[in-house]
Image (tube, rainbow, N blue to C red):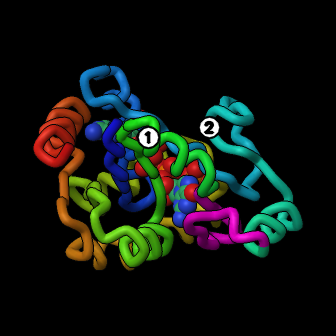
Amino acid sequence: MSKGLLIILSGPSGVGKGTVRQELFKDETLNLAYSISMTTRKPRPNEKEGVDYFFVSEKEFEDKIEKGELLEYAKFVGNYYGTPRFYVDELLKEGKNVVLEIEVQGALQVMAKCPDALTIFLVPPSFEELERRIRGRRTEAEEVVKERLDKARKEIATKDEYKYVVENDDVLLAKEKIAQIIKENA
Ligand SMILES: Nc1ncnc2c1ncn2[C@@H]1O[C@H](COP(=O)(O)OP(=O)(O)OP(=O)(O)O)[C@@H](O)[C@H]1O
Ligand SMILES: Nc1nc2c(ncn2[C@@H]2O[C@H](COP(=O)(O)O)[C@@H](O)[C@H]2O)c(=O)[nH]1
C-alpha cells in the first residue's frame, strides 16, 4: 500500500478552516483522515474529548513534549496545541491523506521536517470579514478575540511560505479548490 499524503491546512483563527474541513470530509473520494490535536485549552460547550481535541493539562502536554511524542507543537494565545505523532504515522501508513489543521508556528515545523507535505493557507476575503467571523462565533472572550486578531495579522504575512493560498469567501468554492489541489497532488 502506498503512503498517504500529509496535508497542512493553516490560516488565521476564524478564517473557516474547521468549516471548510468539514465539507472536505464529506467527499469520500479524497480518502481523508483528521489528525486530532492535543491542547491545554478548555473545551468549548459543543466540543468532545477525542473528537475535536484531546484536552490535557499543561503538565501532561509538557510530558508529551519531553517524550518526543509530538510531531509539532506551539503556544498559541496562552495555550499549547500539538499534533500526536503516533496517529499521523499510522494513518499515513494505512494510505490515508492526513489533514493537520494547525496554526503557523506548528506548520513551519512540519514543513521543515516533511518538505513533501501539501501545505495550504486559507485567507479571508478581508480582515474586516475575519473579525466578523471570529466575533460571530462567540466562543472567545473579547480580550482573547483581540489577541487572536493581532496574531492573525502576523500569520497572514507568512502565507507565501505555503504551497497554495486559497481564499475562503464561499465555503463550498473553497472546499472545491482544495479538493482539486488534493487530487492533483495525491
Ligand atoms: N466562507 C464563509 N463565509 C461566512 N462565514 C464563514 C465562512 N467560513 C466559515 N465561516 C464562519 O466563521 C466562523 C469561524 O469558522 P471556523 O470555526 O471554521 O474557523 P477556524 O479557522 O477553524 O477557527 P479556529 O482556528 O479558531 O479554530 C464560524 O462561525 C463559521 O461558521
Ligand atoms: N500548531 C498547532 N496548532 C493547532 C493544533 N490544533 C489546532 N491548532 C490551531 O490553534 C489555533 C487555535 O485553535 P482553537 O481551536 O482554540 O480555535 C487554530 O489556528 C488551530 O488551527 C495543533 O495540533 N498544532
Which numbered tag is attached to residue 129? none
Going by the numbered disc 2, the residue's amino acid type is Asp
- Classify residue 178 as left or right of residue 115: left
Label 1 sits on residue: 18
Q: Is mark 1 within 8 Å of ligand 1?
A: yes
Q: Quadrant of the N terminus?
A: top left
Q: Which residues are magenta?
A: 67-83
Rendered position, 9 above or below 48? below
Mark 1 or mark 2: which comes first in sequence?
1
Q: Position of residue 71 (x, y in %)?
A: 57, 64
Q: Which residue shows up at 31% across the image and 71% down it?
A: 115
Rendered position, 149 above or below 15? below
| Residue 152 in sight in this render | no
Q: Is mark 2 within 8 Å of ligand 2?
A: yes
Residue 139 colored magenta? no
Going by the numbered disc 1, the residue's amino acid type is Gly
Label 2 sits on residue: 52
Q: Considering depth in this image, is 10 or 90 the residue closer to the camera?
A: 90
Proximity of marks 1 and 2: CB atoms separated by less than 8 Å: no
Q: Quadrant of the C terminus?
A: top left
Q: Position of residue 85 (x, y in %)?
A: 60, 57
- Classify residue 50 as left or right of residue 33: right
| Residue 88 in sight in this render | yes
Q: Dot 2: within a 10 Å radius of its alpha carbon, few (fewer than 14), some, or many (20 or more) residues?
A: some
**Element carrying mark 2:** loop
The number of numbered badges drawn on the structure is 2
Ligand 2 location (quadrant): bottom right
Q: Dot 1: within a 10 Å radius of its alpha carbon, few (fewer than 14), some, or many (20 or more) residues?
A: some
